[in-house]
Structures are given as C-alpha cells and as structure tokens.
Amino acid sequence: MNYQKLLFLFCCSIAITFNQAKAQDERLKNIKEALPKIDQIFKDYAEKNHYPAFVYGLVLDGKLIHSGNIGYTNLEKKVLATNQSDFRIASMSKSFTAMAILKLRDEGKLKLDNPAYLYIPELKNQQLLSKDAPAITVRNLLTHSAGFPEDNPWGDRQLAISDEAMLKMFRKGISFSNNPSTAYEYSNMGFAMLGYIIKKVSGKTYQQYINEKILKPLGMNHTYWEYSQVPAEQLAHGYRWLNENWVEQPLLHDGAYGAMGGMITTIDDFAKYVAFHQSAWPASDAPEKGPVKRSSVREMQQPWQFIGVNPNYKYPTGRKTPMANAYGYGLGHATDGEGRRSVGHSGGLPGFGSNWRILQDYGLGVISFSNLTYANAGYFNVQVLDTLVALAHLKPRVIPVSPILKQRTKELIAILPTWKNAESTGIFAENFFLDYFEESLRKEAIPIFENAGKIIGLKEIKPENNLRGVFTLEGEKANIEISFTLTPENPALIQEYHIKLVGK
C-alpha cells in the first residue's frame, strides 16, 4: 500500500473516533431535551389510571439519568413517594431467581438440563399427560415450559406459604395443562420450585442466597423480601381502586412463593440491577465486575421459549408492526418488525403493578413502580421507550468493529478498483476466485469508481457481526458501498464480496 493510501486511512480513523464521541454527546443532549415530555406522559398516565403513587427511572448506559415521583406511598399518613420508597415488584423478582440459578450452574453445582426431580424428589412420580412425556428440567422451569397451567390469580395468593406446604402440594400431585417442553405457559409454581432448588443446592434459602450473591454485590442495600423488615417510612402500601375510592390491600408475608414475586425494592436500587443487565451489551474483554458473568446475563436475555407473533401489534402512538414474543430465563423478550429488541418483565400483585424494560441495542431502560393492584406499567413503559427513541432521534448502538474486519477493509481498499495482483495478497479464501473472476471483478469495479469521482472519505464500517460488515467510500459525485463476509478460518479470509454505487 502506498504512502497516500496509508495517510488517507489514518485520517479516516481519527475522524471516525471524533464522530463517535460527538454522537454520544448529541445523544445525551437529545434525551435530556425530551425529558419534560416524558415526565408529562408519566404524570398524565398516573392521573388517568388512579395511581396512588407512581415512581419511575430512566437508565442510560448503566446510569440512572432521570427519575420522577408522583403521589403517596401511604395515603393515610400522606407519605410522599421518593426514589427510596420500597415497592413490592411482584414477578419482576423472577429474573433474580433465574440469575441465582445461573450462578449455581456457572459454579458447577447444577445443570439446566437435569431433571428437576434430582433437586425436588417430590416431582419424580408426577402423572404427566402421556407416557412418552419427558421429565421436567430446570430449563423448563426457567422458561415456563414445564407444562403447568397459567396460575396468576391463584399463584399470587400463595406468596406466604411454607416450603413444607408447597412440598405437600407436590406430593399430592400436580395438574398439567401441557406436556413438558411442548409449549409456553406462564407459571408462578415453576419459579417457586426454582427457589426451592436454590435452597437444596446452595444450603441457604433463596432469600439468603440472592441477598448475599446478587443484591449486596450490586449495592442493592434497600431491597427486602419480608415487608415487616422495611422501615415504615419507606414502605409503599398497596391499594385497589374501587367505587371511586382507594381501598388498602393487605400485604402478604414472605414465603416459598416469594421466589416468583416477593421482592420489595426502590428505584435507586433497581436501577443498579438494570445497569448490570445493560453492562452485558456489547460483549467485551473488560474485567468481570458483576455477581455473575456477563455472558450468563446475555444468556438470560435470549429468546429461549417462543411465545407467539402478533402480526398487527400497535405501539401506543398507533404505529403498526409485527411483534414476536418469547421468554428467556426470568425475562420476557420481544422483537418488532423494525428489528428493535427489548427485554424486561412486568409484576402484579394485589396492591402493586410494575415493569422494567431495556432496549438492548440502545443502552436505554425504563423502570416503573405503582402501588395500585395490577397497574399496567408494561404498556406504559413501551410508550415511554418508543417516544424517547423518536423524540431524541436515537439509533441502535453499533457493535464494535473487530480488528479482522478493519484489517480486511484496508486490504480491500488497497487493491480496488484494479484488483492488481489480488490473488497473491493472501487475503482471499480458496473459494473466492472460483466464485468470482478477477477480470469480471475489475470490469465491475473500475466504472463504479469512475462514476463516484475522487474518493474523499471512508465512512465508519458497519459490522453485522465479527466476520461480516459493510463500509462506504465517499466520492465527490457518488458513494461506493462494499460488503464482505469472512470465513471461519484463523486468520479469517474473504469468502464473499459485493460492490455497488449508491447516492450521496
């Protein structure tokens, strides 16, 4: 490569780094300008739906950048809601239970595909729906695919039962709606079983284990399981809206079913948990700082169990797009027709409703807690994220460009458009010149470069993954887009290539 091309590539690299920093600053500025609109949406929604209290937070790239508090956590004493108010978050607890299971798995103390009866012997001789049904696995419990029926109304009232009462129920026999590993059906019972498995494997109650291994390392020091342990001035009381009045609901004590929905926490504390989930994206070589490996957090967020597709999903703004839904490990997963991915979970119990959701590729998350029975915070959080993306003109975070993609980009630029001595460069896979012919490549590329005019810049490489990407050469008259794919060899070689002229 000649000196001029080296200088050109060096200058382009500096420009790309500068542009990335500038884009980050612009992104934060745009979000802050949109916050008054977001606050108004929160306020209007809380008033319309009669929320006694409503607290919320926005987490960007691992930091709680904004929060708000509306109403009272205790109507009788007029206690104002704050970031330190403790709300029961119901089924948002499930991902903590799932994370604890993965931590035990990572330590070699259990296997996800082991039969659950290895840890809960009472499950050994359950009567399944057919003789050829497989055993329930730990993974089935994590993904709501064990064959248990949806049990929200009943399960919510089991929160305080003892381990022995739960095991007695298992000994009596469980009723199944499906065979294991055949369908998704939401099960609180399944997560109560996971809580017991944590106890059997670790020798500690699930509460002790999660407190010691997850909450304390994350600095979640104001998070509880038993409401009687929460400082009275911090505890949010739960209410139901009946006959144009708020009626206080009795709080349930902690018990065996708390693993599915018993956690009590604050916006400040839960934001630390959301930040940890955000830290898993993108994958990196940075030191591990969390209570479990980042790879295990990403594993939790994957769509392990398909739920269904809504071809006519409508965002709160009215925009329609198909929506595919799945379940990970204690987390819901959604991908819309625009390719936007999100994960999170709702929570609902008598007296409470909550939701958290992150857009993995945007580094953006939202948390909402209310002390109204089954408050639909999930629908609202979707609206908030969608509105923020639109108002702040947010774009998905591009994955880092791998060194090999950068290297092959430079090497491709060096031989274009003439392809002179291309075969001798050693950068092409053995298939390349059997599938592409040098003379044809040259005849294709030279007119494209002539039509583009003098090359004046290189736009940032857009990686699809570690071994596939697209880059654009900026010309005075038009741009040139070049895409290529590398082989699984080491070092990875170019196996596929495409070039085309595109507009300015």
Image (cartoon, rainbow, N blue to C red):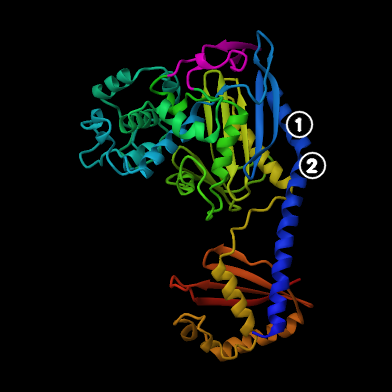
Q: Is 176 or 440 nearer to us in this picture?
A: 440
Quadrant where the N terminus sits is bottom right
- Asked if residue 207 lies left or right of residue 239, the reply is left
Residue hosting label 2: 33
Vertical position of residue 487 compared to residue 140: above or below: below
Q: Position of residue 291 (x, y in %)?
A: 48, 39
> Is disc 2 surrounded by few (<14), some (14 to 19) or many (20+) residues within 10 Å?
few
In which image quadrant can residue 143 be found?
top left
Q: Which mark is residue 421?
A: none
In magenta stretch: residue 174:
no
Q: Is 176 or 395 nearer to us in this picture?
A: 395
- Asked if residue 175 lies left or right of residue 276, the reply is left
Give me the C-alpha separation between circle 1 and circle 2: 13 Å
Residue under the point 47% across and 15% down:
252
- Asked if residue 381 lies left or right of residue 139, the reply is right
- Asked if residue 126 lies left or right of residue 451, the reply is left
Mark 1, secondary structure of its residue: helix
Mark 2, secondary structure of its residue: helix
Q: Is 306 or 496 nearer to us in this picture?
A: 496
- N-term-proximal mark, 1 vs 2: 2
In which image quadrant can residue 197 be found?
top left
Residue under the point 63% across and 49% down:
362
Residue hosting label 1: 40
Q: Position of residue 271 (x, y in %)?
A: 60, 35
> Is disc 1 surrounded by few (<14), some (14 to 19) or many (20+) residues within 10 Å?
few
Q: Which residues fall within the magenta stretch? A: 225-254
In magenta stretch: residue 251:
yes
| Amino acid type, residue under disc 1 in the picture | Gln
Q: Are marks 1 and 2 in contact (CB under 8 Å)?
A: no
Q: Can residue 83 be seen here?
A: yes
